[in-house]
Image (tube, rainbow, N blue to C red):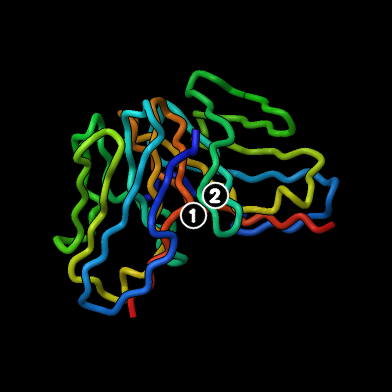
Amino acid sequence: SQQGEEDPQALSIQEGENATMNCSYKTSINNLQWYRQNSGRGLVHLILIRSNEREKHSGRLRVTLDTSKKSSSLLITASRAADTASYFCATDQNYGQNFVFGPGTRLSVLP
Amino acid sequence: DAGVIQSPRHEVTEMGQEVTLRCKPISGHDYLFWYRQTMMRGLELLIYFNNNVPIDDSGMPEDRFSAKMPNASFSTLKIQPSEPRDSAVYFCASSKGYEQYFGPGTRLTVT
């Protein structure tokens, strides 16, 4: 069964604006990850946040986690055309290395 | 490091034929994952290995699919016989922690 669900399914913004994507999940997790996929490529890991963390930063990326609401958000600040991609959240099943990926958010950053 | 290597990158075959997809994980990684990605179903985990041993194959759609990992540097995913509904992009990923490194994928078309 699918664990994470991203929202919105698609997002279109202008270069320089911020992009926010959300991920909701159903069962308890230990870790949540965000990945990016450029068209025709494999997924690339962006950031991992553990269940005891509330916020993490990496460059222009900011990830938050609210375990009480079973949700996470990915914020990309000052977006660039090169940020155009699909973004996926992946949640573990409270055990092991098995992460389940959501359907993704397609982000288009217009120049 | 060259990253995860997959071959072939594209495969076009006729229904009923055997298809073998190949993957070379990153050296030192002890987990290997096979995923299938389609527009309809998103990214699905088919099977994953730890130290060459299959851990969870519950995602393998049916007996037509089989996967092997004879050593730490090589894995295969075989479909026999192939069907048009198997058309998808198949990704291999490897990891030694939670962060997964994806290969470029094999785009399979079954006519």
Q: Write down the quadrant of residue B60 in the picture.
A: bottom left
Q: Write down the quadrant of residue A18 in the picture.
A: top right
Residue A30, given in percent of the width and then of the height, sits at 41, 26
Position of A70 compared to B6: left or right? right
In the rendered image, residues at marks 2 and 1 fall on the same chain: yes
Question: What amino acid is labelled 1 in the image?
Answer: Pro
Label 2 CA crowd tier, 10 Å (few <14, some 14–19, many 20+): many
Question: What amino acid is labelled 2 in the image?
Answer: Glu
**Above or below: residue B60 compared with residue B88:** above
Chain label for disc 1: A
Q: Are marks 2 and 1 in contact (CB under 8 Å)?
A: yes
Q: Looking at the rendering, in which quadrant would you find the C terminus of chain B?
A: bottom left
Q: Residue at x 37, y 26 (%)?
A: B28
Position of A76 compared to A91: left or right? right
Residue sticking out furthest to the left: B63
In terms of depth relative to the viewer, which is nearer, B28 or A108? Answer: B28
Q: Residue at x 46, y 31 (%)?
A: B99
Chain label for disc 2: A
Label 1 CA crowd tier, 10 Å (few <14, some 14–19, many 20+): many
Circle 2 residue: A6
Residue B97, given in percent of the width and then of the height, sits at 41, 25
Residue B7 is marked as none
Residue B26, given in percent of the width and then of the height, sits at 41, 34
In terms of depth relative to the viewer, which is nearer, A106 or A53? Answer: A106
Position of A66 compared to B87: left or right? right
Q: Residue at x 50, y 29 (%)?
A: A68
Circle 1 residue: A103
**Above or below: residue B9 compared with residue A34:** below
Residue B74, given in percent of the width and then of the height, sits at 29, 41
Disc 2/disc 1 C-alpha distance (Å): 7 Å
